[in-house]
Amino acid sequence: MPMSSFARAARSIDADVLSVPERTRAIAAIRADLARRQEEANRRDAALWARVSNRDEWEAFSRPSLTALRRSLGAPVADSAPPETHVTRVTEAEGYAIENLIYESRSGVSVTANLYCPTPGARPAPAIVIVHSHHNAKDQGELQDMGVTWARGGCHVLVMDQLGYGERRYHTPGPRQDYRFRYMTAAQLHVIGESLMGWMVHDIRRGIDMLLTRDAVDPGAIILMGAVAGGGDPAAVAAALDERVSCAIPFNFGGPQPETQYPLPEDAEATFNYMGHGSWESTRNLRLSARDGFLPWTIVASIAPRRLIYAHEFAWDREHDPVWNRLRRVYGFYDAEDRLSYTHGAGVLTGSPPEATHCNQVGVAHRRMIHEALNRWYGIAMPDETQQRRDEAELTCLTDEMRDRLRARPAYEVFGRLGRERLAAARAGLAALTPARRVARLQRDWTTLLGDTEPSDLLNLQAADGPDVDGVRIRREAMRTPHSAQLTTLTLTPPESTGRAVVLCVAQQGKQGFLAHRADEIADLLARDIAVCLADLPMTGELQPNADRTWRGATTSMSATEWMLGGSLLGTKLRAMRGLARHLRATWASVGVWGDSFSPRNPPEWVEPLIGEGAEPHLSEPAGGLLAALAALYEPHVRCVVARGMLTGYAALLDHAHCHIPHDALVPGVLTAGDIPDLVEALHPRPTLVDRSVDGRNRAVATQAPDADIAAWVDAHVGRRS
C-alpha cells in the first residue's frame, strides 16, 4: 500500500461522525446531565431540610456537613501556640494608629497585615477582621476607609493580604490582581491535597489567634467580614468553623449571587440553585460540596446562634429569597432572631453606578446598615465615614531586613515542599507492596480521586462504512455510555487486515487532530497490519463545548461543577475509554492505546505576561497520555501504551509560580496517591512509551530523547503478552 499517498489523503479526511445538529445535541446532553445532577443535589438538600423542625434536628443536619467541610479543606495544621508576630512600623494619626505587622500562619508562611488600632481605652474593644476581595489587596482605598473609620469608632481592624496578594504576591505586579493567578494557586494546592479555601481560612484563624494575644482586644467581640467578589466565601467558612467569631458578615455567599436573576421568581423556594455551579473561582464552588452536603447556605446558617449580617452587593429580593427564610428559621430554633440582620445595595450586576452599587470591597452604601447592626449588638458608635488614604509604601510590612530575617520565599515553594513530602510517603507505601497489590492500590486511589471510573457496555447509536481511502477501510461510529455521554470513532482498517491488532488513539483535539498531526505514523501502523481507532471521548474533539479551554472557559465551569458533585470530567472520559477498549477487544486480537497532545508548547524562556496583555500562554493538554496510562492500569487486556505530550508529573506544576493546564486535566490530591511516573512504573512489564513530555508551564522537557518511531515500537509490542 502506498503509505505516503494515504498519509497525504488522511490529512483531508473529515473525521466528524455527527452532523452539526447531532453534535449540538450530544454536547447539550453532557450539560443536561450536569444540570440533572445539580437538581438532584438540590432536591436531596430540600428533602433533608424539610425534616428539620427544631434545634436538635438542625444540629443533626448541620454537624456532619461541617465535618465534611473541614475535611475537604486539606490536612489539619497543629498550631496551639500563638503565632510569631513582628510589628515593623507604627503610624500614629488623630484618633487611631496603624501597625504594619507580619504574623506566621504556618511553617514557612507569613501573612502581611495592617492593624488599625483605636485610642487605648479602659476596656477591651471589639476586633473586626476584614477579608478582602479578589480585586485588590490590603492597601485598597475602601479597606483603608473601613480601617480608619472603625478604629476611630473604638475597634481594632485587621486587614490582611490574602494568599498571593499584595506583599504576598509572587508573580508580576500590575495595576490590579491577576485573577488567573488565583486560579493557578488553587490548582497547585489541589494537586497536593489542599485547597485555596483551606489556606485562606487558616490565615484568618491565625489572625484571630494573633489578635487574642492582645489584652486590648475583647475575645467575645471578634467580628469577621468578607468583602464582595471572593472575600465573603472564606469569611463564611472561617466563621462556621471557628466558634470564636461572634459575628460574621459574608458578602455574596450562601444565597443569591450578583449573577442571579433579580427579582427572584415566585417559586424560588423550589427552583433556587442552592448548590450553585462551578467556575474558575474555587472558593465559591467548593469541591465535594454537593456530594457531601456542605452547600453554601448550610455553611452560613451554621454560624447560628452567633450574630450574622446576611450581605449582598446589589439589590436583594428579600421577600422571595429562600435562603433568608431558612436563616430566619434556623435562628428561630435558638430564639436568636435578634442576632440576624442584613445589608444590601441597589441595582444589578449589569447596571452602572450610581444606580448599581458596584464596589471593590464593601461600599459606603453597604456599610450604613452594618453600622446600625454593630451599634445595636456591640455598642460601636455610629461613625462618620472617614477617608484618610495612604500610599502603599506607608502600609508596607515586609521590610528588606524582615524579608531576610524570615527568609521569605514564594508560596509555591512551600507547596512544592509539602507536595514532595506527601509524594514520598505515597511512594514508600507503594514500594512496600507486591506488583499486583500496587496496581490494586493505584486503582483504588485513582478512583477515589476521579470519582466513578467503572465502564459499562456502550450503546451503538449509528455506524457507517466508507468511502475507502487508498484501500483503507473507513468506519464511523457514534456510541453512548449509560451516563448519556456520547463518544465517536473513526476506525481505519488495513486492506488485508488479519484482525491482528488495533491501537485506540485519544487526544483532547480528537480524531481530526490525529489526522492533521500524525498521518504519517497512522499510515505506517496500517502498513504493519495494525488498525487504528481514532476516538473522540466526551468533551474532546467534535464533542467539545467550544474552543475556549482557558481558566475562564466553559470547560472550566463544567469541570468545577463535576468536582462539586464528587466526580470529574477526567473520570467521565476514562469510563468511556475503558468501555471502548473493551468494545474493541471483541474484534481485534490485541489492543494498544495511544494518548497524545497537539497543543503548541511555550518557548523555553517564556515569561508570562500580565493578564490581558500580550499573547496568552499555550495550555498543555496532558489528558490524552494520562488517559492511555490509566486505561491500561484498569484494563489488563491493553497490551502496550504510548503516552505523548503528557506532564512529566503533577509535581511539575509546583516548580514555578505559574502553571498552564486546563481545569479538566487537574487531579485533586494526586500527589497523596503517587504521580504519573508511578502509574507508568506500575504497568510494567507491559511496554509503555512516554514521549514528548512537558513541564508544568507547558514547555518541552530539555533532557528528552529524540522522538520515537511510534509505528515500529507499537509493532514490536502490541502482540506481546505480559
Image: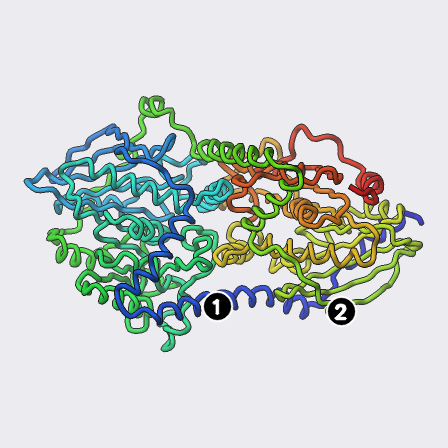
Q: Nearer the viewer, mark 2 or mark 1?
A: 1
Q: Residues within 10 Å of mark 1 (few under 14, many from 20)?
A: few
Q: What residue is at 79 percent from the left and 50 percent from the top?
A: 591
Where is residue 474 drawn, in percent x and y? 84, 60
Side of 715 where 313 appears, left or right? left
Task: State the separation of the CA atoms marked 2 and 1.
Answer: 31 Å
Q: Which residue is mark 1?
A: 40
The amino acid sitting under disc 2 is Gln
Kindly state the secondary structure of the residue where label 1 is placed.
helix
Query: Is residue 207 positioned above or below 480 on the image?
Result: above
Query: Is residue 625 positioned above or below 258 on the image?
Result: above
Q: Nearer the viewer, residue 600 or 298?
A: 298
Kindly state the secondary structure of the residue where label 2 is placed.
strand
Q: What residue is at 65 percent from the left and 45 percent from the top?
A: 626
Which residue lies most toward the left here?
Answer: 122
Q: Which residue is mark 2?
A: 462
The amino acid sitting under disc 1 is Glu
Q: Nearer the viewer, residue 261 or 694?
A: 694
Q: Which mark is residue 705?
A: none
